[in-house]
Image: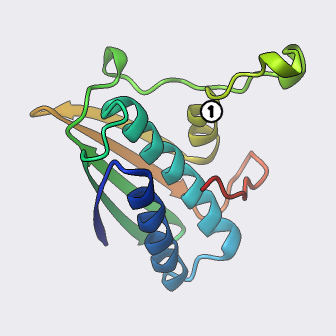
């Protein structure tokens, strides 16, 4: 299934709702749907914030297919390339290592994406970013991350 959206936050929210409906039609349970939604919310919001630098009119194409026990996602945009043509490694910072008023606002997205997705691939082709994500129906080593960001 394919969705075309703009880099406007409302467009991202509406598209995520449509994707969640599609995932339920694929017979994924609620926790699995929320894991996919979390990964896509982080990826799409990163595109809006970084690739399109906050411009609301950037085009994003998202293709999702349910294949047995996994969900495959392909996200394309024409925004700026990722630094060094590589998705960030991400990682989790210990919130106890910061004073409350010094907690970073961001920096956790790629850690979440990599904790949930089994495969993350990125290519820059013909001035387009291509992000490929594979998300298993069930997480093998991490606890299920089921929460809503948007």
Q: Quadrant of residue 108?
A: top right
Figure quadrant of the N terminus: bottom left
Judge whether 143 appears above or below 104 on screen. Answer: below
User: Is disc 1 placed on a helix, strand or loop?
Assistant: helix
Q: Is residue 67 visible?
A: no
Observer able to see residue 130 = yes
Furthest toward the left, the residue is 126
Number of marks in the rendered image? 1
Q: Nearer the viewer, residue 99 or 93?
A: 99
Quadrant in the picture for the C terminus: bottom right
Give the image quarter of residue 84.
top left
Determine which quarter of the picture holds residue 61.
bottom left
At horizontal 87% and vertical 22% (from top left) the residue drawn is 100
Which colouring convention does the figure follow?
A: rainbow
Of residues 101 and 130, which is closer to you in this image? 101
Image position of 29 with respect to 132: above or below: below
Q: Residue at x 31, y 45 (%)?
A: 56
Q: Position of residue 73 (x, y in %)?
A: 39, 56
- Disc 1 designates what residue? 111
Above or below residue 53? Residue 6 is: below
Q: Nearer the viewer, residue 75 or 58?
A: 58
Where residue 66 appears, as percent x and y from the top left, is: 43, 71
Q: Position of residue 19 (x, y in %)?
A: 45, 70
State whether residue 93 is above or below residue 141: above
Q: Residues within 10 Å of mark 1 (few under 14, many from 20)?
A: some
Residue at (48%, 24%) from the top-left corner? 88
Please give left or right for residue 95 compared with residue 25 in the image.
right
Residue at the spot x=66%, y=76% of the render? 29
């Amino acid at each position: 299934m394919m969705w075309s959206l703009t880099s406007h936050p409302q467009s991202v929210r509406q598209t995520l709702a449509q994707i969640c409906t599609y995932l339920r039609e694929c017979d994924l349970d609620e926790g699995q749907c929320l894991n996919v939604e979390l990964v896509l919310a982080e990826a799409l919001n990163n595109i809006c914030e970084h690739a399109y630098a906050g411009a609301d009119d950037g085009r994003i194409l998202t293709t999702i297919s349910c294949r047995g026990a996994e969900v495959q996602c392909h996200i394309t945009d024409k925004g700026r390339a990722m630094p060094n043509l590589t998705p960030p490694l991400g990682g989790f910072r210990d919130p106890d290592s910061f004073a409350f008023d010094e907690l970073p606002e961001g920096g956790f997205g790629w850690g979440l994406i990599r904790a949930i997705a089994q495969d993350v691939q990125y290519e820059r082709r013909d001035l387009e970013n291509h992000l490929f994500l594979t998300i298993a129906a069930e997480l093998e080593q991490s606890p299920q991350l089921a929460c809503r960001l948007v």
